[in-house]
Image (spheres, rainbow, N blue to C red):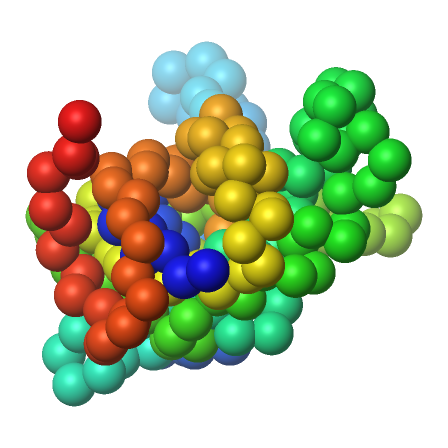
Amino acid sequence: MRWRISLELEDVYGGDGNLRYEPKEKVTLNRTRTKTMVRDCIGVAVKVGTEEEMRERKLEPIATFRLDGETPTLRLGGSHGKLWGAMKGAAKQLYDLGDEDFRKSYRAVSDMVMVSPAWVPLDVDGEIRLEGIPQVMKGSGGGMIVQYFDVIPKACASVVLTFPDVLAPRVRKLLSQLETGTHFNKRRAVIRIVEVREDPKASAPSARPQPVET
């Protein structure tokens, strides 16, 4: 069975090994020195302070999106793609919840679902923003660094799922479960299923979804 799935995504973070570089400036030293002097003319102690600040400017790597021309793409499909991984995580949740369809195992279902194409174009709605995420480095002397990401606030995408017909009810449950969590890079993207339809002759997917059929 082949289903075409129209998705609406929010807060999609870049990654997949794609980097761009942007100059950033940060303060590396900021200190104040104070000393006390007694002025002979008035016999009063006077505090004199000096401030010192050092700044460093360097090119910071920013995790971004692979481009198809000018269109951002995301590796949702293919072997161990991000949507496949999200569905596997959803299957694990249903298994932990004791769902009847996933009571014995959850890996077998996700392993039999193929997602295509590998790189999916994103129809972006809004301006891509830059987001910094602080991260504490490991080790006793580890400090804090900031990782930078390009973030798409909202986008539409379309994929094709191929799987044995007998799995249809379970795949529907997986798609429903996807909407209850966050996924993809940095586990921050929200997925909404806009439309699901059978597509026996699936052609190249269009990113813009159609209205949900009732």
Can residue 182 be seen in this snapshot?
no
**Horizontal and vertical percent position of residue 132:** 42, 48
**Horizontal and vertical percent position of residue 53:** 42, 52
- How many numbered badges does the structure rendering display? 0
Name the foreground residue: 34 vs 168.
Answer: 168
**In this view, 25 is above or below 58:** above
Residue at the extreme bottom of the image, as rendered: 69
Left or right of residue 123, residue 44 in this image:
right
Q: Residue at x 38, y 39 (%)?
A: 191
**Horizontal and vertical percent position of residue 55:** 41, 60
**In this view, 58 is above or below 156:** below
Residue at the extreme front of the image, as rendered: 166
Left or right of residue 57, residue 122 in this image:
left
Name the foreground residue: 183 vs 83.
Answer: 83
Q: Residue at x 37, y 56 (%)?
A: 3
Can residue 118 be seen in this snapshot?
yes
Name the foreground residue: 59 vs 159.
Answer: 159
**Horizontal and vertical percent position of residue 80:** 62, 68
Q: Residue at x 89, y 48 (%)?
A: 140
Q: Residue at x 16, y 34 (%)?
A: 213
Where, quadrant-wise, is the C terminus in this rendering? Answer: top left
